[in-house]
């Protein structure tokens, strides 16, 4: 039985960018990048794509993933959650195969450029941390969130302080604690925690700091990623070299 299973959620029906998950990026479908990095990462025993689309399933299989089920439409809408997807995958594995893995590696297709070595490191970090309920990737924000504002009525106040005095926020950035933004590089999930607590991450989530990454949300993000790939072609080559050699 596979102990570490990568789950790549890739539903069809994106509103912002139509068929975003299979749109070509440097000649490869977006979903193929997450499949490729999962297959290259040591410690990942199995790669499953969770999709509601037969077309997406065929493309995923072409790049080496398993698609043993199609995700029901009722958990494939804009309002469906990551928990819905992961719970459905776990239930299918348990019901159809009689056992479950210890860990899920959650890879979002919208973050295509990853290093397999960092995926391996993230898996080991959570395996070694017995207290953590999950692991989640983050990158440092360019400006501390403590220098940000919210609007209360018609006036600005600093985040977290409940103060309308903005002069504190004008201090040098070195005066503030670093803050971090969650990204789609990798989440590592403990399956028993999901089953027992009906949630993915819990209240003791290990921080896994990655380099800044561009995530696909709007069409212009593809342009940015194409530019990155043109400046550093090895980003793409290292993921698909084995596939190209087999063609």
Image (tube, grey):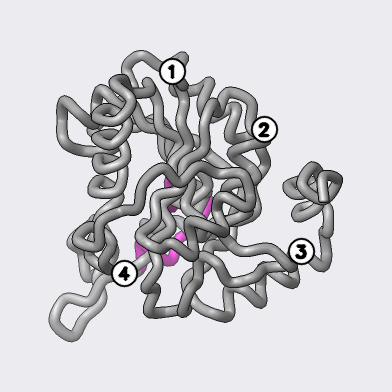
- Tell me which numbered mark, 1 or 3, is placed earlier along the sequence: 1
Q: How many angstroms separate mark 3 from mark 2 (CA)?
A: 19 Å
- Tell me which numbered mark, 4 or 1, is placed earlier along the sequence: 1
Residue 203: quarter of image:
top left
Pointer 2 local density, CA inside 10 Å: few below 14, some 14–19, many at least 20: few
Q: Is residue 95 above or below residue 218?
A: above
Q: Position of residue 173 (x, y in %)?
A: 51, 56
- The reply to whether the C-beta atoms of the residues labelled 2 and 1 are less than 8 Å apart is no
Quadrant of the image containing the N terminus: top left
Near-viewer residue (40 or 60): 60
Q: Residue at x 49, y 77 (%)?
A: 218
Q: Residue at x 28, y 61 (%)?
A: 76
- Give the mark toward the camera: 1 or 3: 1
- Tell me which numbered mark, 3 or 4, is placed earlier along the sequence: 4
- Give the mark toward the camera: 3 or 4: 3
Identify the residue under disc 1: 1
* 115 relative position to 92: left or right: right
Q: Is residue 33 above or below residue 166?
A: above
Near-viewer residue (216 or 51): 51
Residue 43: quarter of image:
top right
Per the rendering, the mark at residue 229 is: 3
Q: Residue at x 37, y 73 (%)?
A: 13
- Tell me which numbered mark, 2 or 1, is placed earlier along the sequence: 1
Identify the residue under disc 2: 117
- Give the mark toward the camera: 2 or 4: 2
Identify the residue under disc 4: 149
Find the magenta span and give its range. 167-181
- The reply to whether the C-beta atoms of the residues labelled 3 and 4 are less than 8 Å apart is no
């Amino acid at each position: 039985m596979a102990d570490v299973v990568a789950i790549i959620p890739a539903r069809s029906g994106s509103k912002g960018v139509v068929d975003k998950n299979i749109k070509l990026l440097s000649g490869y479908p977006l979903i193929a990048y997450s499949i490729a990095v999962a297959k290259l990462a040591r410690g990942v025993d199995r790669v499953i794509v969770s999709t509601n689309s037969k077309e997406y399933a065929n493309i995923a299989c072409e790049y080496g993933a398993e698609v043993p089920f199609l995700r029901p439409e009722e958990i494939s809408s804009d309002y469906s959650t990551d928990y819905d997807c992961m719970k459905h995958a776990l239930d299918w594995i348990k019901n159809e195969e009689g056992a479950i893995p210890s860990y899920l590696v959650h890879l979002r297709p919208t973050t295509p450029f990853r290093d397999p070595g960092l995926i391996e490191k993230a898996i080991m970090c959570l395996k070694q941390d017995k207290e953590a309920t999950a692991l989640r990737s983050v990158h440092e924000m360019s400006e501390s969130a403590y220098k940000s504002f919210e609007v209360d009525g018609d006036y600005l106040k600093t985040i977290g302080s409940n103060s309308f005095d903005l002069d504190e926020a004008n201090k040098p950035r070195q005066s503030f604690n670093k803050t971090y933004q969650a990204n789609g590089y990798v989440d590592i999930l403990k399956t028993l925690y999901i089953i027992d607590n009906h949630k993915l991450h819990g209240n003791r989530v290990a921080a896994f700091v990655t380099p800044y990454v561009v995530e696909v949300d709007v069409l212009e993000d593809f342009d940015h990623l194409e530019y990155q790939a043109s400046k550093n072609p090895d980003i793409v080559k290292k993921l698909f070299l084995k596939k190209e050699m087999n063609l």
